[in-house]
């Protein structure tokens, strides 16, 4: 996939528009590093394109969570262990909020 820099967009907007139209998508770079994906869209496809991008971002997030679960071993927890973890977190969330460093008053 081709790249385009901020400089081209700023100094040669017509060239940028033509390139995006011809290629369909470009990678925007800043100081040589990828920053964003630019996608040519029409008014008719805007809503669908935004929906699909949101869907892909959600899939990427789920894949990351699954990978982290495998790495930490959480994916091997049984139902009882999961319930115990959920209960422990709920108990912490139900504790009254206190200032950091202050001891608990039980």
Image (cartoon, helix red, strand yellow):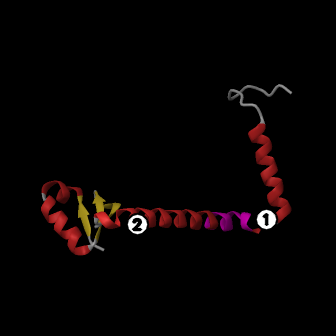
Helix, strand or loop for disc 1: loop
Disc 1 crowd rating (10 Å Cα; few below 14, some 14-19, many 20+) is few
Residue 14 horizontal side relative to residue 3, left or right: left
Residue segment shown in magenta: 67-75
Residue 24 numbered mark, or none: none
Q: Main secondary structure of the magenta part?
A: helix
Disc 2 crowd rating (10 Å Cα; few below 14, some 14-19, many 20+) is few
Q: Is residue 32 above or below residue 1?
A: above
Residue 74 drawn in magenta: yes
- The residue pinned by badge 2 equals 48
In the image, 55 versus 105, the foreground residue is 55
Residue in the picture at 61% in, 63% down = 65
In the image, 52 versus 77, the foreground residue is 52
Asked if residue 32 shows in the view, the reply is no
Q: Give the quadrant of residue 52.
A: bottom left
Question: Residue 30, percent across and down?
Answer: 29, 57
- The residue pinned by badge 1 equals 77
């Amino acid at each position: 996939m081709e790249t385009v820099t901020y400089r081209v967009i700023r100094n040669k907007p017509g060239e940028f528009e033509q390139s995006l139209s011809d290629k369909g998508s470009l990678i925007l770079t800043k100081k040589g590093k990828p920053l964003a994906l630019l996608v040519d869209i029409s008014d008719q496809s805007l809503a669908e394109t935004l929906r699909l991008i949101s869907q892909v971002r959600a899939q990427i997030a789920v894949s990351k969570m699954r990978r982290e679960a495998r790495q930490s071993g959480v994916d091997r927890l049984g139902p009882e262990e999961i319930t115990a973890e959920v209960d422990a977190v709920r108990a912490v969330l139900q504790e009254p909020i206190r200032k950091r460093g202050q001891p608990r008053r039980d």
